[in-house]
Every structure is written in structure tokens, then in C-alpha cells.
Amino acid sequence: MQQPQRLPRKPRSNSPQISRRALARAGFTLLEMMIVVTIILILLSLGSGLYIKSVLRSKEAALKQDLFVMRQAIEQYTLDKQTAPQSLEDLVSSGYLREIPTDPITRAKDWQVEYENVVLSPDQSGTGISNVHSGSSTISPFENTQYSTW
């Protein structure tokens, strides 16, 4: 019996050879990469603008809340003690505020206080602080008014 004739094998190498045409199809071209990077940059610029606006809106909301709480504390102190507080520290020492809040716009405790001769009750004997405002003279871009007038 005759054995079938075998064809000679090609020697195998450890690294397969890739044609230039296959390499060109495997990756991205420089133009494609530049388009993707440009789109990403445009989206980032839009997102960062919205982020900055949302941070400013949250600072304004915190400022409004702080002013509301301090004004309520001034009113409660005046009605309870029958005299208005002479400083914001009086509100803290009497327990009407835990601490004087930091102005979110200026990032300092530089509140502007108004002293007026306003009487909240007939039994009130002394006058003092009647209102409080932010120490910032910056104009709000959303309400077009100075923060110090809030």
C-alpha cells in the first residue's frame, strides 16, 4: 500500500504578519480623532457653563435662607426680650442662632446690619438691630439687584 503524499507545510512564526491594508482598517484616522475630541470639548464647554450657573443659584438660595433665618431670629429675640439685639453675637449667646452663618457670596461673616428705632411690640423698651443684609456689593445676574439690598 502506498501512503498518500503530503504537501510541505509553511513554517509558522510566533508573530503573524498583518498587511498594510488591514492595519489601516484597524485604527482611527487623525481626522476622526480630531472630530471626536472637538465634539467632547464642545459638550464640556456647554456643561461647565451650566455647572457655574447652578453653583451661583445655589449660593443665592443659601443667602436667601440665611437672611430669612437671621431676620426671624432678630424678630423673635426682640419680641421675647422686649429689646432688639445690639449685635449678631447677642443672637448666638441667647440661643436664637447656633452660630452666625457665613455669607455664601463673600465667604465671610461680614453681614451689614441696620439699626432702626422700630418697635415690634408696645412693651419693647430698647432699639437695636432691625434688619441684616449681605456684605457683597455684587449684582445678581438672575435678579439684577445687588446682594446687599436683599
Image: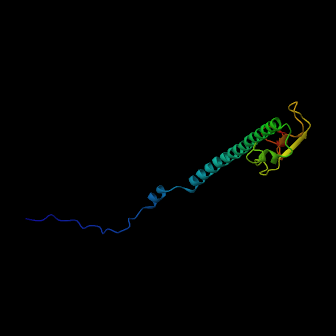
22 vs 48, nearest the viewer: 48
Q: State the image quarter where residue 19 is shown.
A: bottom left
* Residue 34: x %, y % from top left: 60, 54
129 vs 37, nearest the viewer: 129
* Residue 82: x %, y % from top left: 85, 36
Is residue 137 visible in this depiction of the protein?
no
Q: Residue at x 73, y 40 (%)?
A: 61
* Residue 93: x %, y % from top left: 78, 47
Q: Residue at x 57, y 54 (%)?
A: 33
Q: Residue at x 71, y 43 (%)?
A: 58
Q: How many marks?
A: 0
Where 139 falls versus 108 (above or below)? above
Q: State the image quarter where residue 131 is shown.
A: top right
Where 121 falls versus 97 (above or below)? above
Given the current orientation, which residue lies at the most extreme right position? 117
Given the current orientation, which residue lies at the most extreme left position? 1
Given the current orientation, which residue lies at the most extreme top position? 122
Is residue 20 visible in this depiction of the protein?
yes
Quadrant including the C terminus:
top right
Quadrant including the N terminus:
bottom left
